[in-house]
Amino acid sequence: MTIFTRNVSSFRKLVGVVLFYTLLAPCCAQAEIIVIVNAANKAEIDDIAIARIYLAEVKTFPGGSEAAAVEPEDGSVRAEFSDKLLKRAPAYIKSYWARQKFTGGLKPLPQLSDDDAVIKYVMETPNAIGYVDSSKLRDGIRVVMRL
Amino acid sequence: MKQLMLSPCASFRLMRRSVAVCSLGLCAFLVAISASAASFDYSGFASIVAGKTFGACAQNVTVSDFYSSPCTRYVADWAHGGVYTPDISLKPDSKVGLQGSLTFSNHFSATAQVVGRLADGAAVDLEWAYVTYDASPAWTFQVGRKRLPLYYFSASQDVGYTYPWVRLPPDIYGWDAVNYNGVNATYRKQLGEWSLKSNLFAGDETTRNSSYAKLSYNEPKDVKWENIRGADLELAREWFTTRLTYIVSDYQQIDHTSGEPDVLPSGNTKGKQIIYGIAVNLDINAWLVRSEYSVFDRSNFLEKSKAWMIGVGRRFGKFTPMVTASSYAETTPFPDNYTPVNWTTQALSLRYELTSSSALKFEIDRLRDGPNTYAGDANVIAMSYDVIF
């Protein structure tokens, strides 16, 4: 009987561990993301405007000027941006873009290799918008939202 | 996405390497792009799907002789003749697609997509080949070969990665025309919290030796959809998306061997069809609902069918289990010349996000055929690996 009970509890523990790592663990590697524009860009930009730009539904800032949006390649920063700002699982966003690309729909936004490349682009491009890990913050860019 | 800036000398190297394999047309194409230094992107997708039917043998089926001999059968892909039988097979649903896109400027691009499949005698088809002109942020014009946008997922039906099931519910998806040659105009607009997208299109399509017709006829048939004219309207707001469609076209079925038009149940050799429907999709936190209702009105010459599906799923981390029900039912004004059929299907599916660009899926379907048996009752089990690259 004792052996049976122990087996049940270790089985439960195993199930618990497996569930934790498959369902919960991916969500908890949190870092702060900042949405950034060029320091010269004074446009007021809210989360809905940012989401529309990043789903390519609009190509302009709320004031009407053209937005040159870039994003980092697939990775944790992009996954957190999906979760926190677009409010969609990264797989949903990936699927959204696959659907656009293979069906003559919207063109994907340019992807830069990493956070540093995004920061460099935003610093050098007056109408740029991007997002990076907040630890990369530096002069010459303006933070429009913290996630 | 892989981007390749083709400077004249880079493309010259590419030409030298591929000159032995590429056709004259493709070489001319490469010369043309090297001259304009356009940027070239390529990408692709693949689905490897294995499945089989199981359960009691179906009696009195009315499918063609090609499909009548196995104990059970399940039509997974009507348009391309993908049919599961009790023998496990990769053929009905597996496919691979490659897309190349040339961007000439911010406003002009050209795209081609080929898809290879194993269903009904394996073939590689040019599915899409169109030129896009982005006239303004609101208006886009395209000319060439495109997917016929009958349903919500029609445009991405070959890209298994883009939907939660192993395959799109065949009770709605899959007719005797898949693509069309013609023109279309897309209009996009933000209306407050709503985003609106509308598409107007016109064109023609002829399907020679139709795989769809082969399911029902022993003789090869060509199917012609001429004067296709249609419009769709998609409205989305946060967790809600809806799409309305309306399409009309002329219809003709032609005996492939003799070239003579078949006499349809109406007594005519030509008919008119009207296709309309609505899709409603919800994404509320982790819950997803996918639903669609469609009417294919061929009562002018054959039958009128109503089809619907509704699926409810929930994301648990990387897993998305889903329950889906669907139905297809015909009526006919020509009961002496045509036997209407109907059936219902229930499906249980599970999607697992393997990586950020690939998924594994598992699905069980249970189809129950109506009193005028077509393919018969069937249970199907299938597993898929879907990837985009």
Image: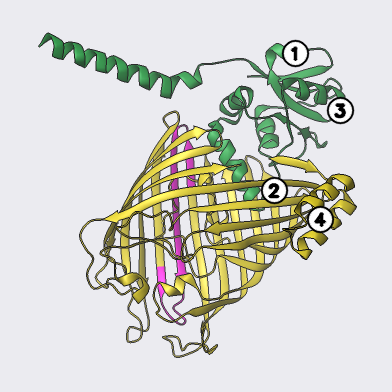
**Gap between marks 4 and 1, in whole Å?**
43 Å
Left/right of residue B278 with respect to residue B58 in the rendered view: right
Secondary structure at badge 3 equals loop
Chain corresponding to green in the figure: A
Q: Chain of mark 4?
A: B
* Residue at horizontal 62 percent and vertical 47 percent from the top: B44
**Gap between marks 3 and 1, in whole Å?**
17 Å
Residue type at mark 2: give it.
Lys
Left/right of residue A61 with respect to residue B167 in the rendered view: right
Asked if residue B324 is positioned above or below residue A21 in the image, the reply reads below
Residue type at mark 3: give it.
Pro
Query: How many C-alpha atoms fall within 10 Å of the one at disc 1: few (<14), some, or many (≥20)?
Result: some
Residue under numbered circle 4: B30
* Residue at horizontal 42 percent and vertical 53 percent from the top: B90
Secondary structure at badge 1 equals loop
Residue type at mark 4: give it.
Leu
Chain corresponding to yellow in the figure: B
Is-magenta flag for residue A128? Answer: no
Q: Earlier in the sequence, mark 4 or mark 2?
A: 4
Residue under numbered circle 1: A137
Residue type at mark 1: give it.
Leu
Q: The magenta stretch spans which residues?
A: B281-305
In the figure, residue A77 lies in which quadrant? top right
Secondary structure at badge 4 equals helix
**Gap between marks 4 and 2, in whole Å?**
36 Å
Label ID, residue B189: 2
One can see residue B38 in this view: no
Residue sitting nearer the eye, B290 or A43:
B290
Residue under numbered circle 3: A126
**Gap between marks 4 and 3, in whole Å?**
35 Å
Check contact, mark 3 vs mark 1: CB within 8 A: no
Secondary structure at badge 2 equals strand
